[in-house]
Amino acid sequence: MTAVRARTPMPLYYHPLYTDGIDPSARFPRERYRKLRARLLGSAGSAVDIRAAPLASRELLLLAHEASFVDRFLSGALERKERRRVGLRPWTPLLIPRTLHIVGGALAALYDVTRQGGIAANMAGGTHHAHWDWGSGYCVFNDLAVCARVAVQRLGYRRVLVLDLDVHQGDGTATILSGDENVRTVSVHCEKNFPFRKAQSSWDLGLPEGTGDVAFHRALDEVLVDAVTYAPDLVLFQAGVDGLAADALGRFALSPEGMSRRNERVFAMCRSRNTPCVVFMGGGYSQPIDATLDAFEDLFSTAAHAHQRYALSFDDERPV
């Protein structure tokens, strides 16, 4: 009989620059990261292990991004129009290490699930609007695409599912990973929302404005059946909560209960197959921010408790 080991707390990556790397006058809701960390320390307790997100290396960024774009960003030499397209204005030099920590946190979570199985998460990221050689929509480098390429090219995964349930289409992820035979990109999003020029994922489900719980979960039924058929050996879950009715940018009408049920169903699918899952935070822009914080607190708490219910034996561990 195979010995079974007790599950450790879910690794959850964070860095103070997730908040402090954005200028205080920016329109982006920078305080959500700091406030969420404080909430999780109080509510999730021993179920999560909050760890410092490391810096991503230039070498790994180049697996998903064009070299001159990477180097212009790292040297602070992006042109004004490139910075404007990203949208994190006013620009600050701290955005450089902030971006590297965001991708580094995602990669660290990927390495964790590769070693130990289960779920690991990053308390930022899901930067799915970043393309091969340009950034967009608050996204500089595409952490989902970088992780997918590292998973296949460095860690030996054969079937990676990028499951994007943010209300906005994962256009950058789709374009970067188009043609990658070992990666399937799926995006469930609001059809009439940013980006207004859609890319082509492996499978796109564009839903109408005002989509509520029933219609969304009907689409999710199809997605989860497809996921089981695809039989991924890794799931990268973009878990934006901007589909909430309270969100300022979403245009969906999901209730908090519908959003929570979404998370439970994704993690149940992964857990039923013992498939490692990395969670990327994604978007959330309610005003005031409390509804977004409630949803993210539920997301990471649900992930942490699902992580505890994975089957883990010594034989399940995979070398990095």
Image (cartoon, rainbow, N blue to C red):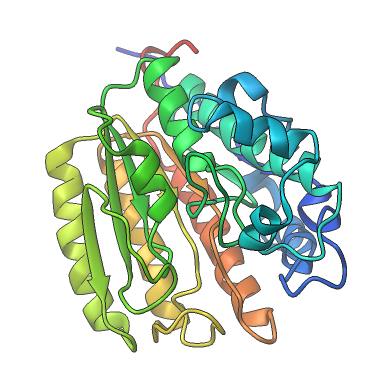
Quarter location, residue 100 = top right
Instruction: Count numbered badges in the picture.
Output: 0
Is 24 placed above or below 8 here?
Answer: below
Residue at (83%, 53%) from the top-left corner?
A: 21
| Percent position of residue 253, x then y | 39, 86
Q: Along the horizontal axis of the image, is 273 left or right of 18? A: left
Q: Quadrant of the N terminus?
A: top left
Q: Quadrant of residue 258?
A: bottom left
Front in this rendered view, residue 88 or 66: 66
Residue at image location 55% in from the left, 27% down from the top: 112
Image spot of residue 81 (x, y percent): 67, 58
**Image side of residue 63 versus residue 38, left or right:** left
Up/down of 71 relative to 309, above or below? above
Name the quadrant containing residue 167: bottom left
Residue 20 visible in the current orientation = yes
Query: In this view of the protein, which residue sits in the foreground, 305 or 137?
Result: 137
In this view, 49 is above or below 213 = above
Considering depth in this image, is 47 or 261 the residue closer to the camera? Answer: 261
Q: Position of residue 143 (x, y in %)?
A: 54, 41
* Residue depicted at 34% across the width and 37% down the height: 177
- Please determine whether, in this image, residue 25 is positioned above or below residue 142: below
- Residue 50 shows up from this direction: no
- Residue under the point 28% across and 52% down: 186
